[in-house]
Amino acid sequence: MATSDKKNSLACVILAAGQGTRMKSARPKVLLELAGTPMVDHGIDLAVSLGASRIVVVAGHGIEQVEAHLRSKYAGLSGLAVALQEPQLGTGHAVVCALAKLRGHRGDVLVLYGDVPLLERATVRRLLSARRRRKAALAMLTMQLEDAGAYGRVVRGRRSVVEAVVEAADASDDILAIREANAGIYCFDLDFLRKASRRLGRDNAQGEFYLTDTVALAARSGSGVVAVPCDADEAHGVNDRFDLAEVGRVLNERTVRRLMAGGVTITHPESVVVHPDVKVGRDTVIGFGVHLLGRTRIGTGCRIEVGSVIRDCILDRDVWVKPYSVLTRSRVKKGAQVGPFSHLRPGVELGPGAKMGNFVEGKKALLGPGVKANHLSYLGDCEIGEATNVGAGTITCNYDGTHKHRTVLGERVFVGSDTQFVAPVTVGDDVVIGAGTTVMRDVPAQMTVVNPKDQKTWPTKQRERKANRRASGKGKAKR
Ligand code: UD1
Ligand code: MG
């Protein structure tokens, strides 16, 4: 983010001090998650994408939690500050609190709400350029509604010039009948806002400092107000858990549509969950109920089948993820296959053409090109060389109760079913391991290894045969 305070630079104030009582949450409302990120981040990311050089989040309830979140997520964002508003005396008071953090700044101030996350960048661009073009004291987003409910009403005078915003609580019936509502998103000339904010009072139905009173001040100031129309859906605020779900659905639908427009097949669009930062290459097919989360990247021509959940992974092209697989912070290279029912925990890397199949769990496991681990295995803290075949039921015993240890297998190793590797242990290239072996010591290349186990076979006694039959329900029924 640029830090120079040149004339036309943009600052952004995000109002987020409201309590959010209806959420009934232990956390401040703006930290509740939408599309995988706290709500307030949607405003910050929008401001950053518009080139804001200063961003002030106004917080009150749970400010420590808000600050802690911002510190950890936006540590590198130099122009970001948090302003305390305590007590919360209205939107005008909230902006006054923010202005204290914008000393020395000149230019435009965009005012956003922390709980209005559907606002689109193109709409805000229109707002910003409308103010600059008209050199207005402020530009505001307004919307047309059948019933404007609790929204502030936009009062226009002669030649439709905006004269004021009147809050519903203060409005006469005539004013309540106005259908044009204030969306609550503004772009101010900062000099005007500084002066106007000093003139706000609390003589109104709610006893609050109304930011909306700046509209009448601007209308009278000569430089005026410009109203920019916006779609009411974009200004939808989140006030309860139902809003949270609905707004989340809309955000998800936008992301899903963006992917489809880019050439991705999504067989049941309403069933999938895709976070906004996910990228998917064309001709990839996403099946029913798939979740693509975090910063997942998926290449072209992949198939992601029903019920798979992929978080923060990179999948190269032509990868096939079969049903109900769960992949986290892992990398899957070209043409590899995963699942059904595989669990790739963080740090798995599947080489080109490798396979990790039914009920296989991996963690920090590097599987070379063409490695097959198709059935019922645990592969943790290991490195497996090219073209090695891992038999069913193989377990890397990586944990000695205190520390984790590595298993290293060479290339073209044949691992018989039900093998255990007691780590740390290293096995060379071209080794053959018999079924049921517990590999406890290193094995040099080209060796065959088994544990000496003997099989004894003898005739079963008649008494035992009867007992077995009874147990299996095949004995004679008792009268
Ligand atoms: C405000 C507008 C109203 C507009 C509506 C659009 C005022 C006086 N009214 O209504 O014209 O139609 O938004 O949604 O501005 N906040 C603070 N500190 C406070 C009060 C609020 O940070 O002291 C924050 C809230 O967390 C919220 C935003 O400001 O994010 C808007 O507050 P809210 O109470 O929802 O809006 P209203 O005042 O009802
Ligand atoms: Mg209010």
Image (tube, helix red, strand yellow):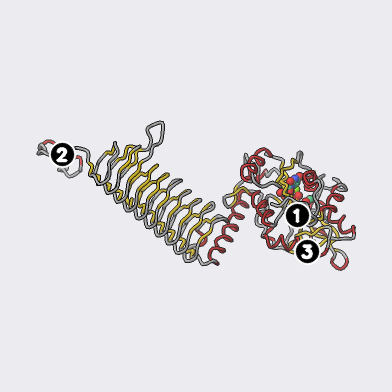
Q: Quadrant of the C terminus?
A: top left
* Residue 151 in view here: no
**Disc 2, ligand 1: is the CB inside 8 Å?**
no
Q: Name the mark on residue 130.
A: 3
Q: Which residue is mark 2?
A: 455
Viewer-nearest residue: 85 or 302: 302
User: Which comes sooner in the sequence, label 1 or label 2?
Assistant: 1
Labels 1 & 2 near each other (Cβ < 8 A):
no
Q: Is residue 458 left or right of residue 270?
A: left
| Percent of width and height locating residue 316 | 45, 58
Amino acid type of the residue that numbered disc 2 sits on in the rendered structure: Gln
Residue sitting farthest toward the front:
445
| Percent of width and height locating residue 209 | 82, 46
Q: Which residue is mark 1?
A: 10
| Percent of width and height locating residue 67 | 67, 40
Q: Is residue 387 above or below residue 442?
A: below
Residue density around tag 1, few if under 14, some if 14–19, many if 20 or more, within 10 Å:
many
Residue density around tag 3, few if under 14, some if 14–19, many if 20 or more, within 10 Å:
many
Residue density around tag 2, few if under 14, some if 14–19, many if 20 or more, within 10 Å:
few
